[in-house]
Image: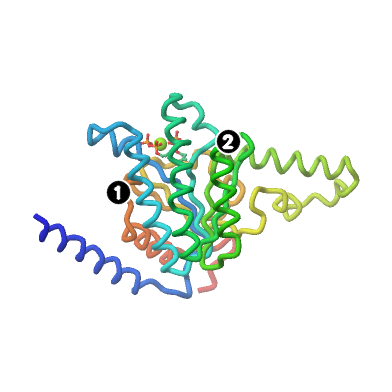
Amino acid sequence: MGRIQDRTVADLAGREETLRAALDPSRMPRHIAVIMDGNGRWAELRGLPRLEGHRVGREALRRALEGARECGVEVLTLYAFSTENWRRPRDEVEALMTLMVEAAKEEALDLQQNGVRFRASGLLDAMPPGVQAAIAQVVALTQRNTQITLNLALNYGGRSEITEAARRLARDVVEGRLTVADIDERAFERRLFAPDLPDPDLLIRTGGEHRLSNFLLWQAAYAELYFTDIHWPDFRKLDLFEAIRRFQTRTRRFGGVDLG
Ligand code: IPE
Ligand code: IPE
Ligand code: MG
């Protein structure tokens, strides 16, 4: 049994490496955003509590980060908790919060050692104080890292982000820092949660649903979309590399024409 498993693991690593090596380094997405969906269904299919899916999903997160780093991707944004996820049963929400604190504490050193700059975007002030503190610690510890930025979308909603940007604009006008005529796309973008990050080039959703669920509504205007039925806990580097391979076959026109 052990031997068969070892061989499968080695096979997978070999296939991953082959696929990664075949990717075109000059056409890598700078920013990949992922809707990590399907944790609950992964667990339910196995007769396990939904929380087990979230727990195992942490390993998928680690693999995705490693794969993105190996490809030279600059930013990986992961949708971890939406502004609508508060609608879930209280025990699931609480378990998710506990899991986030545990993950932040346990992964901090590895993130630091792997050159990962950790960030979070969303309505963080409305998160439980324990989560806020754990996040702030990892952000501070990793702020000087430059290999890759891991941006965790936490209590994130595209609509609330846009509304917040509108509020910031209005305040700047009222307080005389800006005139109405100054309001353009750049001025708006500068007031979003992470104005220094490039727009996502590739947006992946696992778990089989074909929707955005309020993710990066502004920033995904020209993202290439990639949907897979794989549940997030099953997501492997191979799946990330396959998504990038497909991305590299697409023609991005940004409204223009392809001049070949
Ligand atoms: C995504 O998995 C994780 C979060 C939203 C926190 P789900 O928990 O939505 O899993 P499904 O979609 O119910 O399978
Ligand atoms: C999107 O998944 C949010 C995250 C992955 C954090 P959901 O499971 O909440 O989305 P819906 O409810 O299926 O649209
Ligand atoms: Mg879901």
Answer left or right for 107 relative to 44.
right
Q: Is residue 30 among what the camera can see? A: no
Residue in front for this viewpoint, 199 or 114: 114
The three-letter amino acid code for the residue at tag 1 is Asp
Give the residue pinned by disc 2: 127
Answer left or right for 49 relative to 82.
left
Give the residue pinned by disc 1: 234
Residue 160 point in image, percent of width and height? 63, 37
Mark 1 or 2: in front is: 2
Which quadrant of the structure image shows residue 117?
bottom right
Dot 1 or dot 2: first in sequence order is 2
Q: Crowding near pointer 2: few (<14 within 10 Å), some, many (20+)?
A: some
Q: How is the image coloured?
A: rainbow
Residue 166 point in image, percent of width and height? 74, 41
Residue 144 point in image, percent of width and height? 60, 64
Q: Is mark 2 within 8 Å of ligand 1?
A: no
At 23% from the left edge and 36% from the top edge, which residue is drawn? 46
Q: How many marks?
A: 2
At 30% from the left edge and 31% from the top edge, which residue is drawn? 49
> Which label belongs to residue 172?
none
The three-letter amino acid code for the residue at tag 2 is Met
Q: Secondary structure at mark 1?
A: helix
